[in-house]
């Protein structure tokens, strides 16, 4: 087989992917980093960062990582990866019909946006259903809003909403700590209602169903690892995250995973960056040996 044009294709240009791509390029490898959106990943939608060790915003860190990747010689490409085939060299296909090949791949595609699991959900995406309090809070100033889910970063998202409205309700299937200033319901959303946009949700609590008026639901439940394009044979854990060893290697030679998509991820930016560095080191040492 001909030598593939790239040494490494990094799938996903979030913090893990950009860091992996930069590290590999610094070692002299030819790197393509593909993303279905603009570089930056989840950081693009965040305001002030927490637990990161430095005072910064998501977009600031995203643009710093992007600049570092470009300066290192990483080729940033646009494309939604739909399939990865081969066992090194790999063929990486995108939904718009492009095909690329490389000696190694790093998957750093993070999590798919949250889902309530309701049949008419798509109808309300962007018309009442949101995944970004920082982006959409100004649209719901003074109005009643719901945060679906209380785990992970949902609390911070609720706090972001409290800056613009005092009517924030958090709905989660499990009882948990109260969030100051926020109404908390134990239950789940089982219906979305409205004509031109979302007007209310049906909430099931203790076996009873009630309709609650709301202008928006911010969805932080039902996130899944964005790894559908990888072969089914690649080892995943029970929640669909890619299983990696301590060096970020998957069960497939020359295939690595980093960031929120990998098994055991703690969903923190600092971890995603550390994962990216680790994946870069592993790619470099794997390709040197081959
Ligand atoms: C609401 C919220 C608030 C947060 N706040 C903080 C915080 O304050 N502090 C902190 O430390 N962490 C925070 N985090 C967590 C942090 O943002 C993530 O841990 C980090 O972004 C994970 O990086 P990643 O590179 O693994 O994935 P992502 O940042 O999710 O990047 C993945 C990239 O892959 C791309 N992609 C996905 N599928 C494909 C495909 N098929 N083809 C091509 N590209 C694809 C996506 O478009 C995306 O750009 C927050 C997360 C959320 C959701």
Image: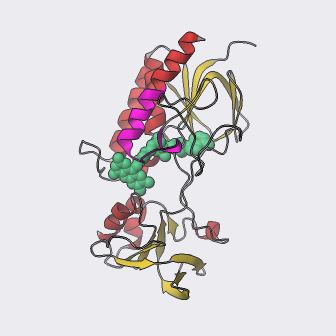
Q: Quadrant of the N terminus?
A: top right
Residue numbers of the magenta segment: 259-279
The answer to if 274 sits in the magenta stretch is yes
Q: What residue lies at 42% left-to-right and 28% top-to-bottom?
A: 277
Question: Looking at the image, which residue sits at the far right?
Answer: 1
Q: Position of residue 41 (x, y in %)?
A: 47, 44
Q: Position of residue 251 (x, y in %)?
A: 62, 31
| Labels in figure, total | 0
Q: What residue lies at 39% left-to-right and 33% top-to-bottom?
A: 274
Q: Is residue 137 above or below residue 91?
A: below
Q: What residue lies at 42% left-to-right and 62% top-to-bottom?
A: 151
Q: What residue lies at 44% left-to-right and 32% top-to-bottom?
A: 276
Q: Is residue 42 above or below residue 99?
A: below
Q: Position of residue 62 (x, y in %)?
A: 39, 40
Task: Give the quarter of the image for residue 184.
Answer: bottom left
Q: Quadrant of the C terminus?
A: top right
Q: Is residue 19 visible?
A: no
The structure's colour scheme is secondary structure
The answer to if 105 sits in the magenta stretch is no
Q: Is residue 138 visible?
A: yes
Q: Is 138 situated left or right of 198 in this image?
A: left
The rendered magenta stretch, by its main secondary structure, is classed as helix
Foreground of the two, 246 or 56: 246
Foreground of the two, 133 or 174: 174
Q: Position of residue 279 (x, y in %)?
A: 48, 28
């Amino acid at each position: 087989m001909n030598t593939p044009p790239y040494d490494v294709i990094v799938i996903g240009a979030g913090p893990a992917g950009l860091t992996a791509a930069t590290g590999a390029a610094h070692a002299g490898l030819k790197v393509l980093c593909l993303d279905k959106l603009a570089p930056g990943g989840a950081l693009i939608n965040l305001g002030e960062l927490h637990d990161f060790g430095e005072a910064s915003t998501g977009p600031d860190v995203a643009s710093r990582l992007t600049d570092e990747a470009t300066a290192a010689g990483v080729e940033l490409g646009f494309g939604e990866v739909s399939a990865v085939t081969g066992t090194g060299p790999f063929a990486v296909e995108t939904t718009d019909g492009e095909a690329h090949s490389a000696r190694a791949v790093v998957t750093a595609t993070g999590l798919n946006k949250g889902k309530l699991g309701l049949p008419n959900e798509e109808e309300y995406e962007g018309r009442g259903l949101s995944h970004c309090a920082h982006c959409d809070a100004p649209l719901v100033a003074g109005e009643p809003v719901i945060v679906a889910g209380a785990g992970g970063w949902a609390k911070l998202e609720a706090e972001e909403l409290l800056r613009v409205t005092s009517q924030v309700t958090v709905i989660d299937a499990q009882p948990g700590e109260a969030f100051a200033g926020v109404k908390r319901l134990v239950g789940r959303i089982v219906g979305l209602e409205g004509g031109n946009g979302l007007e209310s949700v049906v909430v099931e609590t203790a076996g009873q169903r009630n309709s609650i008026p709301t202008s928006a639901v911010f969805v932080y439940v039902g996130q899944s690892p964005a790894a559908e394009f990888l072969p089914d044979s690649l080892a995943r854990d029970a929640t669909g995250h890619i299983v990696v060893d301590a060096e970020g290697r998957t069960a497939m030679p020359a295939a690595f995973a980093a960031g929120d998509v990998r098994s055991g991820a703690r969903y923190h930016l600092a971890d995603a960056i550390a994962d990216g560095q680790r994946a870069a080191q592993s790619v470099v040492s794997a390709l040197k040996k081959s």
